[in-house]
Image (spheres, rainbow, N blue to C red):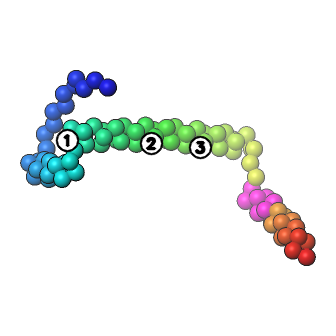
Amino acid sequence: MSKEAVFTMKLEPELRAEFMAEAEASHRPASQILRELMREFVQRQRQEREYNEFLRGKVSDAREQVRAGDYASADEVEARFAARRARLLAKAGSAGA
């Protein structure tokens, strides 16, 4: 990848000095470390944006299901899973005998 763009920033002298010392201690150019940090930031932002879009879609779908009455009450869910647990326990009991 071509490195033709220049990025200028202002920061505290102490932060710059500490960063440069750590870059030197890691035997890596400061520009390489900054590029890596930028790539990581871009990736995190994209992942967060994609997750938020996914989540908004799920919430929208759930709201539409509620509006359409396509859902089970808490009592119905409990009853279904109580029956499921009972079947599984019975199956496990008969398999162990």
Q: Residue at x 91, y 76 (%)?
A: 97
Does label 2 or label 1 sit earlier along the sequence?
A: 1
Residue projecting furthest to the front: 27
Q: Which residue is mark 3?
A: 59
Whether residue 15 appears in this view of the structure is: no
Looking at the picture, does residue 6 appear above or below residue 51?
Answer: above
Numbered circle sitting on residue 29 = 1
Q: Residue at x 19, y 27 (%)?
A: 6
Please name the amino acid that badge 2 sits on.
Answer: Glu
Please name the amino acid that badge 3 sits on.
Answer: Val
Q: Which residues are magenta?
A: 73-82
Residue 74 at x, y percent in the picture: 73, 59
Estimate the spatial distance between the alpha carbons at disc 3 and disc 1, rounded to whole Å.
45 Å
Residue 41 at x, y percent in the picture: 34, 41
Residue projecting furthest to the left: 13
Q: Within 10 angstroms of label 3, few (less than 14), some, or many (20 or more) residues?
A: few
Q: Are marks 2 and 3 in contact (CB under 8 Å)?
A: no
Numbered circle sitting on residue 19 = none
Q: Within 10 angstroms of label 1, few (less than 14), some, or many (20 or more) residues?
A: few
Residue 42 at x, y percent in the picture: 36, 37
Please give left or right for residue 87 compared with residue 51 in the image. right
Quadrant occupied by the N terminus = top left
Secondary structure mostly seen in magenta is: helix
Please give left or right for residue 42 compared with residue 58 in the image. left
Which label sits in the foreground, 2 or 3?
2
Numbered circle sitting on residue 48 = 2
- Is 81 covered by the magenta stretch? yes
Q: Residue at x 76, y 58 (%)?
A: 77
Does label 3 or label 1 sit earlier along the sequence?
A: 1
Total of numbered circles in the picture? 3
